[in-house]
Amino acid sequence: MYIRRRRRIELLMKGLMITSLTVIVGVLVAIIVVILIRGGRALSLEMIFQTPKGGYYLGKGGGIANAIVGSLCLGFGAMFVSLFISLPVAFALQREYTNRTLAAVTKLALDILWGTPSIVYGAFGFVIMVFFGLHVSMLGGIIALSFLMLPIMTRAMDEIIRMVPVELKEISYSLGATKLETSVGVVFRQALPGIITGMMLAFGRGIGDAASILFTAGYTDFMPRSIFDPVASLPLAVFFQIGTPFPEVQQRAYAAALILLVIVLAVNLIARLLHHRLSRNIIR
């Protein structure tokens, strides 16, 4: 009787896990199918490689090359700015450099920042821009996106660095290496695949965000020429196009969403490949 009850519970839990996995994969497949069906017909080489021409938002010719290039500039720019801040912070949170109380407070602050709505970062970034006398520009968008990506990247790196075996650090210290030499020569190399994954995770979150760049990056029909000029982005291209009353322009919005989805999927795939390749030399 007792064994039968345990088996029923095991079957129930297994069923819940399979159902949950099916729901997660099903949601991703449903999103891809809907975007592909609605946007696939409007997708063309003209849309990918050309900038908007006169009357584009009324259904005439042109494309969203400016938004594609702008999104990549914003995403990679914010990712590298966040990297230069989050990597030292992630190392500083380790036991060798910071006491537990300070580390716990810092992690709590990062968790709160992680859950903060992106529109708040947009408003905060706008205040920063006004304080320094900046106008809406690529630089403003990069600053606002960096605020959004910083806690994601830092917490991911912190978790990865903490997974490095303590024995490796102890061996390094026993050989006479300093804390800095151990962090750079041992811990960083061991955590590198995870660090790259954290960077790509933050990039995927940042490049698809519209609220944080709505007030800071602006929007333009031209290619970015300087970090001080307004820049277009794919999320805002989707937002502006889907709000028009013209069905052909609304289809272009789904096509822009499809391009954005492909970029995010490609970045995640590259991150997986890099993680697999770099993990070969990891000591577990």
Image (cartoon, rainbow, N blue to C red):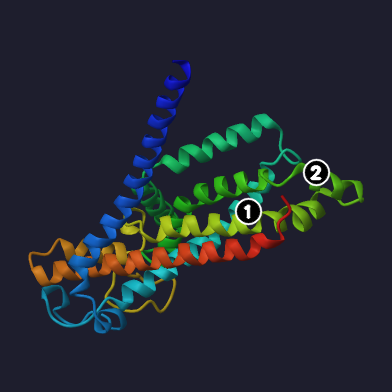
Q: Identify the residue at image location x=9%, y=68%.
A: 247
Within 10 Å of disc 2 (Cα), the crowding (few <14, some 14-19, many 20+) is few
Quadrant of the snapshot with the N terminus: top left
The answer to which of marks 2 and 1 sits earlier in the sequence is 1
Which of the two marks, 2 or 1, is nearer to us in this view?
Answer: 2
Residue at which label 2 appears: 167
Residue 233 visible, this orientation = no
In the image, 116: left or right of 182? Answer: left
Q: Identify the residue at image location x=19%, y=75%.
A: 42
* Amino acid at the residue labelled 2: Glu
In the image, 232: left or right of 152? Answer: left
Residue 197, image x and y in percent? 55, 57
Residue 64, image x and y in percent? 27, 76
Residue 31, image x and y in percent? 27, 57
Residue 117, image x and y in percent? 36, 44
Q: Identify the residue at image location x=42%, y=55%.
A: 205
Residue at which label 1 appears: 87
Q: Identify the residue at image location x=28%, y=61%.
A: 32
